[in-house]
Image (spheres, rainbow, N blue to C red):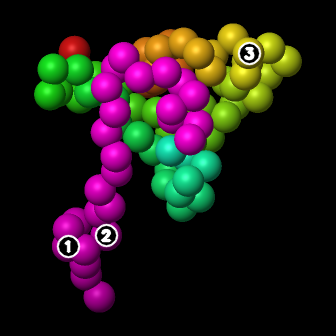
Amino acid sequence: MFLQIGEIAEQIPDISIHHKCGFVDQIFKSNSQLQGVAVTENGRTAGLIMRISFYQKIGTLYGYTLYMGRPVELVMDKSAGGGL
């Protein structure tokens, strides 16, 4: 059985590059099935934040304190941003 991409693709939320990491934490906590969030700037994709890498970064000794009040730009994967 073959599936079309539209049948298996899921839409993910997008947030501004200016949001704080605490906002991403709230998004992931409110949706346990969500695996990633797109980060946008001026209507274009700037990066991607995957759940596992996000929690790996904030799960370090000082990670939570260091990142929660800072912009998502510090933890996003810029290579997934389409060349911005």
| Quadrant in the picture for residue 1 | bottom left
Task: Give the crowd class for mark 2: few <14, some 14-19, many >=20 residues within 10 Å.
Answer: few
Residue type, numbered disc 3: Thr
Magenta residues, start to end:
1-26
Query: Does the CB distance between marks 2 and 1 fall below 8 Å?
Result: yes
Give the distance between the C-alpha atoms of the residues marked 2 and 3, in whole angstroms.
37 Å
In this rendered view, identify the residue nearer to me: 62 or 79: 62
Which mark, residue 65?
A: 3
In this rendered view, identify the residue nearer to me: 18 or 57: 18
Task: Give the crowd class for mark 1: few <14, some 14-19, many >=20 residues within 10 Å.
Answer: few
Q: Residue at x 29, y 56 (%)?
A: 11
33 vs 81, left or right, is right
Query: Does the CB distance between marks 3 and 1 fall below 8 Å?
Result: no
Count of labels in the image:
3
Q: Position of residue 48 (x, y in %)?
A: 39, 32
Residue type, numbered disc 1: Gln
